[in-house]
Image: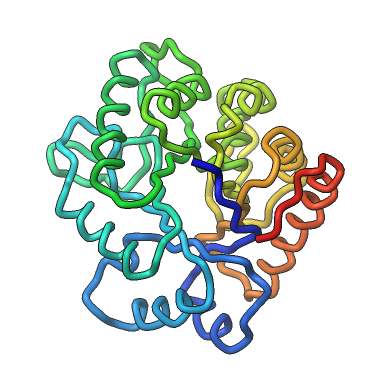
Amino acid sequence: MTRPYLGYGLGLRKEHYQAVIDTRPGVDWFEILTENYLVEGGKPLHYLDRIAAEYPVVMHGVSMNIGSIDPLDFEYLERVRELARRVGAAWISDHLCWTGVNGLNLHDLLPLPYTEEALEHVCSRVEQVQDFMDRPFLLENPSSYISYAESTIPEWEFLSEVTRRTGCHLLLDINNVYVSAYNHDFDPLAYLAGVPSGHVWQYHLAGHLNNVSHIVDTHDQPIIDDVWALYAEAVRRFGPVSTMIERDDNIPPLEELLAELERARDIAEPLLEAGGRRLQA
């Protein structure tokens, strides 16, 4: 499948619903947090319906629990599929992680051991999700703070092998690459070099909290210069990929996020034009 290109987007947050409707900002698309809209009616769906009628939408979830040993929750997946149909989502994504076991949701994105056994398990579950959904599925690389002694496969190779075996695609979170590289002392450029370019369908750009000894992926700060520089390297390697700004806390006025999004355009567009690979959203 040819990689679709949506352009430059924002994560849709409730603080900006009315501003988006009133001002029709120059955003190419929006990403929604799936679990915020798995409800019957209410204001979130009311605003989402209005915005989805004007802008392309993709869905990003935190509860698929793709790495857990619990059975996949097909009741949850059915609700996700119905929401995707309602808003015409271009694709659905979730994280390479586990979020709970024995039916207990820990409300965190927990890392996996990168082993052959885990790889086979994740691939089996990704294939089940793809068979169930009626649109493309993307996996996001996590940010992490611990690693397992049992791990034998670098994260980027693990993700690459998941895409090779299942045909799924990648949501490459540039900030997460930077955070994990800092926390685990590896080269973020090696991560980019190890990812198959044709399977990268989306970028996340976000801010974080640097505690010197480690970085926490807080999504509540502006994007730092080093992450912007890593984004530029990703654009050089992967070409035109749908890009978005992700802010989950300390939500600023919409204008501040639009300024960050314009910086993403200013970085990417000259690089794409120089490489002869610019596409129109």
- Image label count: 0
Is any part of residue 206 visible from this angle?
no
Residue 123 coordinates in the image, percent (x, y): 31, 27
- Front residue of 162/103: it is 162
Q: Residue furthest bottom?
A: 22
Q: Residue at x 51, y 67 (%)?
A: 56
Residue 175 coordinates in the image, percent (x, y): 61, 42
- Front residue of 199/256: it is 199
Asked which colour scheme the image uses, the reply is rainbow
Q: Is 40 rendered above or below residue 106? A: below
Q: Residue furthest front?
A: 1
- Front residue of 77/19: it is 77
Is any part of residue 64 visible from this angle?
yes
For this view, does 254 lie left or right of residue 57? right
- Front residue of 149/31: it is 31
Residue 64 coordinates in the image, percent (x, y): 28, 45
Q: Is 110 rendered above or below residue 10? A: above
**Residue 25 sits in which quadrant?**
bottom right
Residue 32 coordinates in the image, percent (x, y): 44, 63
For this view, does 133 lie left or right of residue 167? left
- The quadrant of the rendering that contains the C terminus is bottom right
Q: Is 233 rendered above or below residue 79? A: above
For this view, does 253 lie left or right of residue 167? right
Q: Residue at x 76, y 41 (%)?
A: 232
Q: Residue at x 13, y 43 (%)?
A: 103
Q: Residue at x 70, y 40 (%)?
A: 239
